[in-house]
Image (spheres, rainbow, N blue to C red):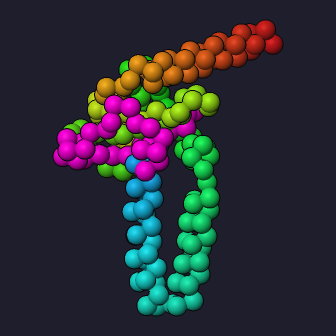
């Protein structure tokens, strides 16, 4: 399990908008907050459509949306990292496999934001799609990704995280053998 969020970047956008080599916390926050801004615009559109049928329901939804927006504005940047969802991942120093729910093709890129070490800044890295594996029930897709131009500092954080998880697993196995 790893705090990990993703954003699918269409091929053309990836070419025209590369990630900075060392994204700072404000860039990361702004970049991933774009998704929330787009979601907020979609909510406003849907609420206005609902308002045509039920003014009371539209008023209630607007109030809830305002409350959520207020809470988001009061969260500081360090707390924002805790909002990254926990995901089951298969991770290595060279790449990662995660489940996603959106459609994706091999020419797209995926930008990952993950927090391998709790006391360190999060990692933002663009990834190439190596393999797309749809789930049998069609509910999700597992994508195998390869990191593109990951900084050495970010790779160090990742390797440390992987090693600590391997040690944790070895200790669990050792404990099970002695029990």
Depth check, front residue: 107 or 67: 67
Label count reads 0
Residue 107 to residue 146: above or below: below
Q: 10 or 18: which is nearer to us?
A: 18
| Image spot of residue 1 (x, y percent) | 57, 33
Q: Quadrant of residue 92?
A: top left
Compared with 75, 142 (above or below) is above
Q: Is residue 107 visible?
A: yes
Q: Nearer the viewer, residue 31 or 22?
A: 22
Q: Quadrant of the C terminus?
A: top right
- Residue occupying image coordinates x 75% and y 13%: 175
Q: Position of residue 93 (x, y in %)?
A: 43, 19
Residue 25 highlighted magenta (yes or no): yes
Q: Is residue 162 visible?
A: no
| Vertical side of 30 occupied by 25: above or below | above
126 in the magenta segment: no
Quarter-wise, where is residue 75 in the image? Answer: bottom right
Give percent across and percent down for residue 42. 40, 70
Q: Identify the residue at the far right of this view.
A: 179
The location of residue 82, given as percent across then percent down, is 61, 44
Picture residue at 44% right of the left edge, 38% below the top: 24
Left or right relative to 8: residue 139: right
- Answer with left or right where residue 154 lies relative to residue 134: right
Residue closer to the observer: 153 or 108 = 153
Q: Which residues are magenta?
A: 1-30
Q: What residue is shown at x 56% (from left), y 84% (from top)?
A: 59
Q: Is residue 42 above or below residue 109?
A: below
Q: Residue at x 26, y 39 (%)?
A: 18
């Amino acid at each position: 399990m790893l705090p990990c969020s993703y954003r699918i970047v269409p091929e053309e956008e990836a070419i025209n908008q590369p990630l900075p080599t060392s994204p700072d916390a404000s860039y990361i926050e702004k970049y991933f907050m774009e998704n929330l801004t787009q979601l907020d615009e979609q909510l406003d559109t849907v609420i206005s459509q609902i308002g045509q049928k039920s003014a009371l329901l539209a008023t209630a939804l607007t109030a809830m949306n305002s409350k959520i927006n207020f809470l988001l504005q009061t969260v500081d940047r360090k707390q924002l990292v805790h909002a990254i969802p926990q995901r089951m991942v298969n991770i290595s120093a060279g790449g990662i496999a995660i489940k996603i729910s959106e459609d994706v093709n091999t020419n797209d890129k995926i930008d990952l934001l993950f927090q391998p070490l709790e006391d360190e800044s999060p990692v933002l890295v663009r990834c190439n799609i190596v393999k797309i594996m749809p789930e049998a029930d069609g509910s999700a897709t597992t994508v195998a990704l390869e990191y593109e131009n990951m900084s050495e500092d970010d790779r160090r954080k990742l390797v440390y995280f992987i090693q600590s998880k391997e040690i944790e697993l070895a200790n669990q196995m050792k404990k099970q053998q002695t029990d």
